[in-house]
Image (tube, grey):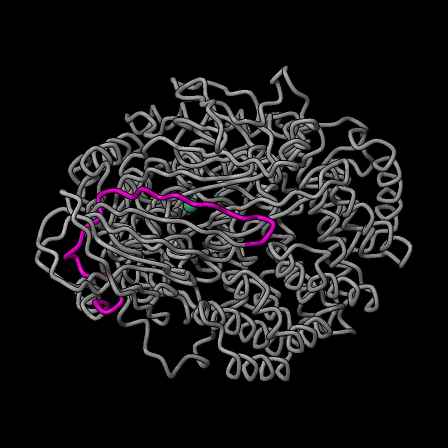
Amino acid sequence: MSTETRLLLDESVSYRLPRSVVPERYDLHLVPNIEEGTFSGNVGITCDIVADTDEIALNSLDLIIDAGKAVDDKGKEISAEVTLDADNERLKLTFGETLSAGRWRLQIDFNGELNDKLHGFYRSSYTDENGVKHTLAVTQCEPTDARRIFPCFDEPDFKAVFKISVLVDSQAVALSNSPIESQKIEGSQSEKTGKSAKSAKDPKDPKESKSAKSAKAARTGEKKLVIFKETMKMSTYLVAIVVGHLEATEPVIVDGCPIRVWTPAGKTKLAKFSEKVASSALSFFNRYYGIKYPGEKLDLVAVPDFMFGAMENLGCVIFRENALLLDEKTAAQQELERVADVVAHELAHMWFGDLATMRWWNGLWLNEAFATFMQMLATDDWQPNWKRWDTFGASRGAAFSTDGLLSTRPIEFTVRKPEDAEGMFDVLTYEKGASVLRMLEQYLGAEPYRLGIAHYLNNHKYGNTETTDLWDAIEEKSNQPVRQMMDSWIFQGGYPILHASREEGGQSWLITQRRFFYLPEEKRSHVKQESVCRYQVPIMYTAAFGKDRVAGRVLLSGNSTEIKLPSAADWILLNAGGHGFYRCAYSDDDLASLTKDVFNDLSAIERFGLLSDLWASALNGSIELKSYLRQSYKFKAETDKNVWTVLIGAINYLNQIVGKGQRASLKEYAKELVMPALERTGIADTGESSAKTGDKDAVKEQLRGMLFTVAGTIAESSEVVKEAEALYAQYKKSRTSVSPALAAAAVSVLSYHGDETLYKDFVQQFKKATTPQEEERFMYALAGFRDKALLAKTLEKTLNGEIRTQNAPYVVRSVMLNPWGREMAWAYMKENWDKMVKVYPVVMVPRMCEGVTGLISEDLLLDVQDHFEKNEVRQGHRTISQHMEKLAVAVYFKTREQHTLERSWLKY
Ligand SMILES: [Zn+2]
């Protein structure tokens, strides 16, 4: 498996820059003209030329190159002829004479456009509380967009020191990876240097009021030159610059490092929570890694338009607003978790990714998987009450659902072209990657694993690595065959389902593995898969003998293994602790014993696993839908939120499947399942806000909100709808008077039943929202109505600028997943396809297309296939195939289960 990767990598040579010129340092100067939407700049790249040459290639894209030359140590200049190769995103400098081996400085002048596609150097804007519009210039380089900002050797192993400076409006804030070294007003004598240098927009400057200063600056067009300190040696994809009108919190010092949160004007009050997360996470990572944070300061910057959740630029992490800012008094549990996760994730990268970096993009998964794993660990350390590892089951479930497809991919795969790397930012990289790391950690034990990580970082700091370097480091510290085990998970796609069969009356158990697929066997007979896939499965099990339990572990490396027990067991559970990235199946009798006293015998995460495996087996036809439904009733008394995500996930899936005449059965089933649970938690709001950080009740409230939503929508409980109306009325009077989880649920319930008046009201709420969470809540609610005319209005907003392009593709997706809007949204997407591809950020188009998984009919399936045959999605063909396969799975499921869906489900 690894050999195959190596062979393929050789083919990639043409996409890689030659190693004959190695950059050491960039002196980068940029002058953004925000009003005009342009920028100009120059870069001096000090590099080591390994052998005499008269030609140098580097990366450049969408830049106009004005001049290029090379200068040697003694100041000798050789000018270059510049050729651009747009297809390969390259710039070639051809010199009139040979540059002899040694140290040279390449000097290039260039200019470009501040784009609106949220990559490279781009514009982002917002309107403040006083109605004043502000435009920022922001960078986003990963994976390969630094080349859109300045010509560079844009590959992760060309690490170099960056000395960055910018010339900006004197009133603008300018941020970059390092602290400011000096800044001065252009043409003036006054210069501030070193530590005393502050942003010129210091709100505490007593001499002049803010508005007087801006007025003066606007009059004079005054500029300031901001020079940042040198960075540590780092990759080009981590370069960050933000320029514009922003405000900051007071710095908080953690282990000597100042942390500040930067926000659009008027929003620093929403930064308290992330400041706490960052402080706790930074200190946690300093301890866990045993290496001090490698930057000199840490700025967390919220910008109004951002393609991803956030980006781990060393010392200058950039976020979309909802991933950094929130109001603790009104945020729901999942919103708190989201901010905690993203902040911890990005900080984990400061070491893993920024300090030690993958050699090439095939290693991106490890960066992301590891940061995802660490975000859980850090959050769990900070808020053990949240039971973050249990909640992680839902992330693992998302990975399972893509990785059970024929069209899945191995976690690590060959990356040749830049767009291959863009296709890597998916659930397999993040969620599956983190799941297999957690499986490894649990199997080895937390401490040997941690020692391995620290060992790896120490060996490779400021350098670049291959995935195997990590396995070797952990192997050294744990004395376990880590590389061999992990290769089977990293270099082949999919995962196994284990079957446990009782032998010798239960004293011995035969465990076999085969690969799990959602497509039923007859639909994939053309592909030979099973025979070639074998996983090294670290099995953790529990066996029951009356009241006694025996726990054990065994590594399954072949097709089967045997577990020998001291005597005959009543039952055996194969994924004890629930951390394994595999599914399990048991005979009917063994399943019956295992679920007899399920709430006492199994932990919440184990029940979660058992139930998700049953649901997956129903989807692929290994068991009948009615068997799943029958099992699901056993969980009516369930109190764990995560187990409920499986039960509710199945209800939502069936909501997509059912035909007109079958909706009543679904409604009856949903009611039967969720109403008793909702009544236990209480339908009416207690009126107390429970969003206090770390408050256990916030998790309970989240479950209540989930149950409330299903009860008020699919189950159509009139009592719940009435309560939703009352809650919303109360919420409009005072945001903090309603439990945040219920406020969110009420908004969903009301949109489901809402008319035009409510729609208009929600549009207003969306537009005047004071927190990113509230804005998002009402924005998505606009996709939850059932009236087609209203949904058409929502779709319009995705292209007319009312909804930002960072969100619009997700709103289109939501309407496509709404059974009442899906066909219309599909037609709308097809009709506006070219425009969407043009204006939406590149990586978001395949994500938008996930909406097609809701188009569950044979005719639509053909139409979807036809559309994507004619319109290839450049960065996402694999993701698109996965969406189409998910759709096919749903269509087969629906056809197969027609007879069951037509009867009353309560009879099963
Ligand atoms: Zn990341």
Residue at 46 percent of width and 80 percent of height: 523
Residue at 51 percent of width and 50 percent of height: 308
Residue 707 at x, y percent in the picture = 71, 46
Judge left or right: residue 188 versus residue 794: left
Please indicate, yes or no, whether residue 17 appears anywhere in the rendered image: yes
On screen, 193 above or below 678?
A: above
Magenta residues, start to end: 12-37
Q: Locate the N terminus and report the quarter of the image it occupies.
A: bottom left
Viewer-proximal residue, 318 or 80? 80
Judge left or right: residue 424 versus residue 721: left
Viewer-proximal residue, 499 or 249? 249
Judge left or right: residue 842 versus residue 568: right
Residue at 33 percent of width and 37 percent of height: 163
Residue that protrudes farthest toward the right in the picture: 757
User: Is-magenta flag for residue 27?
Assistant: yes
Ligand 1 placement by image quarter:
top left
Residue 393 at x, y percent in the picture = 49, 46
On screen, 38 above or below 168?
A: below
Residue 46 at x, y percent in the picture = 22, 45
User: Is-magenta flag for residue 615?
Assistant: no
Please indicate, yes or no, whether residue 583 appears anywhere in the rendered image: no
Viewer-proximal residue, 295 or 810? 295
Residue 150 at x, y percent in the picture = 37, 53
